[in-house]
Image: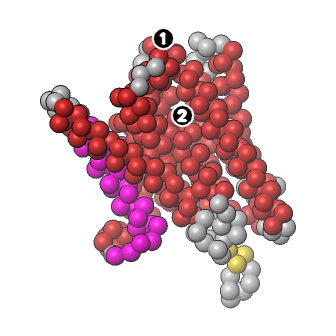
């Protein structure tokens, strides 16, 4: 059975970084360009400035719990290394630091110097958030001994999932904290953007499974997801909650713009993102050099 800590770490770090990235990009664009549709979107996305670092920070706690011992945690951060795990850990710390500093500076005196400093910190935080979004998928795809995950589609799927769950968290946050009439125009715009993200994720998932079956007809991982022991988690969680429900609610809300059912799709997208991490980690197997048989890679 896969260690739950690593799945929650990948989920929270991706979702938090995705929420912040969306929020920061909208905010940075508004500083130079202010069309009505972007201002409307900001009513939904601005919560990511706070939610992002808090959620990624919680993910970091799960990473440290997965490492198990304090000395192992210090080794990850302070041992000279260019491994993706070390780079990713430092990127998370840098992201949290820059994003929190940007919020603090933004709350100080409104002067040109402070404004430029806040912008610089926010740009750095956005770049680090992009790295956090990308690196987990790259890290999982970097093991040649795990054929199913050793594919360029895996980072793409994790990136799209991070953006989709991040948007889902922003939509839920807006639903809980804002008046429905205030955020309705922004919700419509965000749902359209998320619909594109979810559609691309569905295509990438289908392509990954097809590639696995064509390239490795004996692929135990693909079989476990499609028809085997993980089929329920994959079809109900990853596909149903993560793709079908969000798309269905988004289409419904496009026909009825004032409908609040979008929050159901947003919550389902978040649950589907967690299921995706669990499904991929549980499906990952490598081949033992000793026995020649398949063994679970993450235990």
Q: Which residue position holds label 2?
A: 168
Residue depicted at x 42% and y 40%: 20
Prevalent SS, magenta region = helix
* Vertical comparison of 84 with 278: above or below: below
In the picture provided, is 66 more to the left or to the right than 255? left
* SS at badge 2: helix
| Mark 1–mark 2 CB contact (< 8 Å) | no
Q: Any mark on residue 244, and which?
A: none
Quarter of the figure that contains the C terminus? bottom right
Which range of residues does the magenta coloring cover?
A: 80-103
How packed mark 2 is, by other alpha carbons closer than 10 Å (few <14, some 14-19, many 20 or more), is many
- Tell me where residue 162 appears, x and y as whole percent: 54, 45
Quarter of the figure that contains the N terminus? bottom right
* SS at badge 1: helix
Q: Is residue 102 magenta?
A: yes
Q: Is residue 280 visible?
A: no
Q: Which residue position holds label 1?
A: 181
Residue depicted at x 39% and y 61%: 89
How packed mark 1 is, by other alpha carbons closer than 10 Å (few <14, some 14-19, many 20 or more), is few
- Tell me where residue 226 appears, x and y as whole percent: 79, 54
Residue furthest bottom as drawn? 290
Q: Is residue 81 magenta?
A: yes
């Amino acid at each position: 059975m896969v260690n739950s800590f690593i799945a929650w770490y990948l989920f929270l770090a991706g979702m938090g970084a995705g929420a912040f990235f969306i929020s920061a990009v909208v905010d940075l664009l508004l500083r130079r360009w202010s069309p009505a549709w972007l201002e409307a979107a900001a009513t939904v996305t601005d919560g990511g400035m706070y939610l992002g670092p808090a959620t990624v920070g919680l993910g970091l706690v799960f990473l440290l719990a997965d490492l198990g011992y304090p000395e192992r945690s210090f080794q990850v951060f302070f041992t000279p290394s260019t491994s993706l795990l070390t780079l990713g850990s430092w990127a998370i710390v840098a992201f949290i630091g820059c994003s929190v500093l940007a919020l603090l500076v933004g709350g100080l005196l409104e002067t040109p110097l402070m404004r430029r400093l806040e912008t610089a910190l926010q740009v750095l935080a956005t770049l680090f958030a992009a790295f956090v979004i990308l690196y987990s998928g790259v890290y999982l795809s970097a093991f040649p001994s795990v054929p199913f995950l050793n594919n360029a589609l895996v980072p793409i799927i994790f990136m799209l999932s991070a953006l989709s769950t991040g948007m889902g968290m922003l939509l839920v946050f807006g639903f809980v904290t804002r008046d429905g009439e205030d955020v309705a125009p922004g919700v419509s715009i965000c749902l359209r953007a998320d619909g594109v993200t979810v559609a691309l994720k569905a295509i990438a998932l289908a392509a990954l499974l097809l590639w696995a079956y064509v390239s490795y007809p004996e692929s135990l991982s693909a079989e476990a997801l499609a028809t085997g022991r993980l089929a329920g988690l994959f079809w109900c969680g990853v596909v149903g909650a993560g793709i079908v429900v969000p798309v269905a609610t988004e289409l419904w809300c496009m026909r009825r713009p004032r409908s609040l059912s979008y929050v159901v799709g947003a919550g389902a997208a978040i649950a589907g993102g967690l299921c995706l991490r669990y499904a991929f980690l549980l499906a990952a197997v490598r081949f033992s050099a000793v026995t020649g048989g398949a063994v679970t890679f993450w235990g």
